[in-house]
Amino acid sequence: MTPTASRPAYTVQTEHALLRCWSPADAGPALRAIESSLAHLLPWMPWAKQYPMNVAQQAAHLRRMRGLFDLGQDFAYGVFSRDGAEVLGGTGLHPRVGEGALEIGYWVAAGHTGRGLATEIAGALTRVAFEVEGMRRVEIHCDPRNVPSARVAQRLGFTHEGTLRQRLVAPDGTRRDTMIWTLLADEYPRSRAAAVIVEAFDLLGQKLL
């Protein structure tokens, strides 16, 4: 996945959220959202082991993610309320699953779970992956025990291709299984993801979707 003059999508608007690439200036609200959600992030998200951290450390982390975004190497987005005032979670399009494919990752802050937000943002990035980036395949990976995450993939029309046994190391150091959910380009138009309300814009604010 290589950025062009118009790609990637720097800002994505859904019905209830604003997705945009992280900025170091988001460190304070991002830190508050993450540290208030650690109890429900730690079982599933290896990166959550880095916390607690201070605002300067968080700003440096967001700066690295923004750098990878601008270089076209990885695409992490903050998930904000529609007015941009509150961090609701994080998501991303990750080109680590092979040529012509992107993996979608997501987390939702503890105070905003159970409202369909993860399905909404994952559906929005599925549309961006297929309609803006022209991908052939989109994947979602999750621990089989993370039932809400698996339901997101299922609701959006992804197919459970298989479960890789003891493939990754969990945050507690144990080996964990990983479910692989996949949606192909020719399946996408019939999926629920294709109906998600979304607008996408490039770094100049020009509409992509």
Image (cartoon, rainbow, N blue to C red):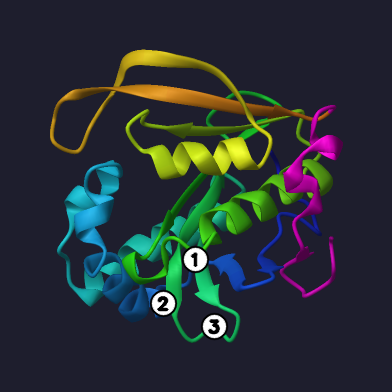
Q: In this view, does 165 lie above or below 150?
A: above
Report the magenta residues as a range: 186-209
Answer yes or no: do the residues labelled 2 and 1 have beta carbons within 8 Å? yes
- Residue at image coords 23%, 43%: 43
Identify which residue, 183 or 5, lies in the foreground. Answer: 183
Q: Does the magenta stretch include residue 122?
A: no
Q: Which of marks 2 and 3 is nearer the N terminus?
A: 2
Residue matched to label 2: 26
Crowdedness of circle 3 by 10 Å Cα count: few (<14), some, many (20+)? Answer: some
Identify which residue, 144 or 81, lies in the foreground. Answer: 144
- Residue at image coords 32%, 32%: 145
For residue 84, the mark is 3
Answer yes or no: do the residues labelled 3 and 1 have beta carbons within 8 Å? no
Task: Check disc 1 and give the amino acid type.
Answer: Gly
Q: Distance between the residues labelled 2 and 1?
A: 9 Å
Residue matched to label 1: 78
The quarter in which the C terminus is drawn is bottom right
Q: Is residue 141 above or below residue 34?
A: above
